[in-house]
Image (cartoon, helix red, strand yellow):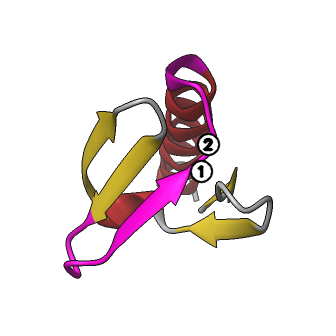
Amino acid sequence: MILVKKINGDEIIVNCQLIQTIEFMPHAVLSLTTGEKIIIDETRDDLLRKIIEYKRTIAQRMEAMEWI
């Protein structure tokens, strides 16, 4: 889950596992696997950083659980 800011300034949490595509024109438009589209006010670099950090965290947790 990642925290993003919508263009109206509201912050929402998005399940990045549901993100199907991201378009930048000039705002980022997230197309989810549910069919919903969300327009957010995030730069390409910031959005990708958030997604990568989230996925790294999940992968590290999975690796740690393998030792249990």
Circle 1: element type: helix
Quadrant of res 13: bottom right
The correct choice, above or below, for 54 with respect to 36 in the image is: above
Q: Residue at x 63, y 26 (%)?
A: 46
Crowding around mark 2 (Cα neighbors within 10 Å: few <14, some 14 to 19, many 20+) is: few
Give the quadrant of the N terminus.
bottom right
CA gap, disc 2 and disc 1: 6 Å
Give the residues in magenta: 32-45
Residue topped by disc 2 = 57
Mark 1 sits on what residue?
61
Please name the amino acid that badge 1 sits on. Answer: Arg
Check disc 2 and report its element: helix, strand or loop. helix
Residue lying at 65% horizontally and 59% vertically, measured from the top left: 6
13 vs 23: above or below = below
Residue 39 pos. (x, y %) = 47, 57
Q: Is residue 41 left or right of residue 29?
A: right
In which quarter of the view is residue 38 placed? bottom left
